[in-house]
Amino acid sequence: MTPTDPARLAVRSPADLIAAVPYLLGFHPADSVVVVALRGRRIIFAARADLPDPGADPQPPARHLAEVIRRQRADAATVIGYGPAGRVTAAVDAVRTVLEGAGLLLLDVLRVTDGRYWSYLCTEVDCCPPDGNPYDPAASQVSAAAVLAGQVALPDRAALTAQVAPLSGPVRVAMRRATARAERRLTRLLLRAGGPDRPGGGPPLGVTGGDRPDGGPPLGAAGGDRPGDLAVHGAGVAATRSAQRRHRRGERLTDDEVAWLSLLLTRLSVRDHAWERTDGRDADISLWTDVVRRAEPGLTAAPASLLAFAAWRAGHGALAAVALERALAVQPGYSLALLLDDLLRRGVPPSELDGWPAVALPNVVRRRARRPRLPRPGA
């Protein structure tokens, strides 16, 4: 679910709209239903869903798409189905019916298959021949304008998923060693602050991204005034601020810095501090993407959720979705990921939650309005 980028793309025909869709979504859709919503003459939102499986009821995903579009306060829409007619027709018909029932003006309903498109609404043979209309996105002025504006359309959703996939090979070996050093560093910090934060002989701290694998409460979930908690929170604040400053200067974090930060983010108070300082700026997206890809997989729930939040605030709904998939694969009950996933699925635009958090000073993100208190992960 993707609010459109501020860059203006002039769309004057169905072929122009088809060329624009990959830049609205961030990737070229396949076997999909896409709804492009308009308010007045401006495209304000694009939502995508997979085509229903053969024989499946197309109504539930159609109703979901319609509800998402309704939230955008759109007054018109175009529905585009990508794939063979046998799968597309029933899906787009269901979406069309629900959108019309919600009072939206349907500008067109299209099917895109193998470099040609057909309109379900147009019956004029001159402009809508039975064999469809050919189109070439590479030759489109819309595509050229999007590229010139710095927009990117990846080949498919798998390519987007690969952008947040864990790095392997020598990088993974180095990060595994760095995380072991970070574990020892955290143990020393806790001992200096007044004793270990876990029973003797328990598993390493933080290895599951916020939950205690020994069945205890989440790290940082209780006892926030204990010396160990205060020491870890202070170290986490320092690590977060240092990482953001360095990344905004174009510097890459070392393996030890990524390992230390990812481990400290298992503390909810540290995670929340990082959340309050994260917005939709390119530097935030770049930082959390780097941490998600390099951190040990078991420690990625927090940075993946922070990446999702930054991407959502920036209007990159598809990137937010794949980041949340990583977070929830590691920790299905992670509260921040579940909250953001719900916002994304319901199509809640970032503008509805301005001040959650917001920029108060240059280069510093601060809360302007109190946001709801979240349940602890696993609660």
Image: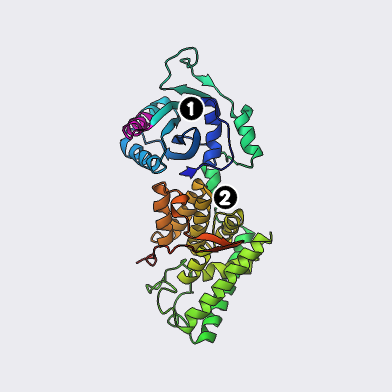
Please identify the quarter of the rendering in which residue 234 is found.
Answer: bottom right
Element type at mark 1: strand
Q: Residue 206's x, y, as percent?
A: 48, 71
Reading the image, the residue beneath label 2 is 163
**Magenta stretch: includes residue 117:** no
Q: Nearer the viewer, residue 122 or 26?
A: 122
Residue 207 drawn above or below residue 80: below
Q: Residue 324's x, y, as percent?
A: 46, 54
Reading the image, the residue beneath label 1 is 112
Q: Main secondary structure of the magenta part?
A: helix
Q: Label 1 sits on what residue type?
A: Val
From which residue to which does the magenta span run? 91-104
- Residue at horizontal 45 percent and vertical 14 percent from the top: 124
Residue 174 visible from this viewpoint: no
Neighbourhood count class around disc 2 (C-alpha, 10 Å): few under 14, some 14–19, many 20 upward? some
**Magenta stretch: includes residue 99:** yes
Q: Label 2 sits on what residue type?
A: Gln
| 280 left or right of 53 in image | right
The span from disc 1 to disc 2 (Cα, nearest Å) is: 27 Å
Residue 170 visible from this viewpoint: yes
| 293 left or right of 372 in image | right
Residue found at the very far top of the displayed protein: 126
Q: Residue 362's x, y, as percent?
A: 61, 61
Q: Tell me the number on the disc at residue 181.
A: none
Q: Quadrant of the N terminus?
A: top left
Q: Quadrant of the C terminus?
A: bottom left
Element type at mark 2: loop
Q: Nearer the viewer, residue 13 or 295?
A: 13
Residue 232 drawn above or below residue 242: below
Neighbourhood count class around disc 1 (C-alpha, 10 Å): few under 14, some 14–19, many 20 upward? many
